[in-house]
Amino acid sequence: MVNQQIDHIVRSASVAAHHPNAIQILADELGQDFAHVFLYVSPSADFDNVVHLAQSAFKTDRIVACTTAGEIMSGYTEDQIVAVGLPNAHFSTKTILINDVTSVNATDLIGDMIRARTELTDANPTFSHEVAFLIVDGLSLFEDQLVSKISSGLGPVPLFGGSAGDGTRFEKTFVSFNGTSHQNAAVLTFIRSDCVIETFSLDHLSASSEKMVVTRADPARRIVHEINAEPAAREYARILGKDPNQLSEFTFASNPLVVRVGGRHHVRAIQQVTKDNDLVFFSAIDEGLVLTLADAEDMETHLEREFSKIADQGSLDCMLICDCILRRLEAAQGQKTIALSNIMAKNRAIGFNTYGEQFGAMHVNQTMTGVAIYRPENKV
């Protein structure tokens, strides 16, 4: 069991997912009097039981949970339940459960968002900093559409988030609000605080000169059948100089593809290859899309530099992060897991590995999105 409480505003703890008293241990370590509790739950745990027990163990009516593709507490870990508590003294929250992301009424959702923001502001006039945190089913295939609808109701509020995971199995993912498990759902939490809070999105990738075109696809299922008029997996492997039969999640993590949107390059990450030589992607894909093979900066150098910039802005209490599973796989393949874990631990980055990340109006891949929380007496 790991806890991080000394002189920190945001409280956090983790425990082995299969411990018989896991939730009570987390509640004892975190203490009580929280505006909100987040639980990042290993897919090896009994998710329904975890969220049910959490309702009585934590003395708050706002508990949000999700399954993960890995947990982050003092660096990369696994088979854990990580708990994060936002204390009432510094935070206030409003949460919206989106029951079915495939049939969202945008007008109703925006109305709910505006009411939540207004109520939160009126109830906490001295809490001048705000952020929105979105957790969504990572197998719903609707993150892109959902984030687009949500962005219309955010106003000036920055948004970050992550897609719930299932390790590397890609079979079933869950989100929960106040003890009830949901699939094809999302949980949107508005947070106000007297702490300075700053969102960020990081990736270590840039576009190379190697381009390819999606020539046949099934956008609804995020499946690419053909690239450059050839079977997608075979053509991708040819461009990499690899055997198509040896493509794996490690190949995809180390050889990501990017698209140019709004003057910037964004990753379109590959999830898996099918028996028909199709490529399944983590985010939106369509015919005619130009994909570019990405070049990668050293992950350790990049993360150390970017986290140093964030830490230099004030008295950093912690970071809440959503880190793509492909970053974790790439780190493992490049023997960077320990180095990245040390950097995250040094900066008290707490969170989970995802099947995709949300930032502003975008659903992205192979990034780390998050929020840096600074002590209130320090201004950014």
Image (spheres, rainbow, N blue to C red):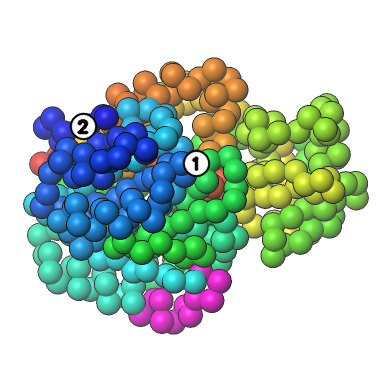
At x 46% / y 41%, what residue is drawn?
44
Image position of 269 (left or right of 119): right
The residue pinned by badge 2 equals 4
> Quick check: 47 above or below 145?
above
Q: Residue 278, position in %: x, y? A: 80, 49
Marks 1 & 2, CB-CB < 8 Å contact? no
Quadrant where the N terminus sits is: top left
At x 49% / y 76%, what residue is drawn?
104
Q: Earlier in the sequence, mark 1 or mark 2?
A: 2
- Check residue 102 for magenta coloring: yes
Could you classify mark 1 by the number of other residues whose Cα lies within 10 Å: few (under 14), some (14-19), or many (20 or more)? many
Could you classify mark 2 by the number of other residues whose Cα lies within 10 Å: few (under 14), some (14-19), or many (20 or more)? some
The residue pinned by badge 1 equals 69
Using the image as rendered, state which of residue 344 and residue 114 is in the foreground.
Answer: 344
Q: Residue 275, position in %: x, y? A: 81, 46
Using the image as rendered, state which of residue 74 and residue 66 is in the foreground.
Answer: 66
Which region shows up in magenta? 101-111
At x 26% / y 45%, what residue is drawn?
23
* Whether residue 47 can be seen here: yes
Using the image as rendered, state which of residue 380 and residue 35 is in the foreground.
Answer: 35
Label 2: which secondary element: strand
Looking at the picture, which amino acid does disc 1 mark?
A: Ala
Q: Residue 347, position in %: x, y? A: 30, 29
Image position of 3 (left or right of 78): left
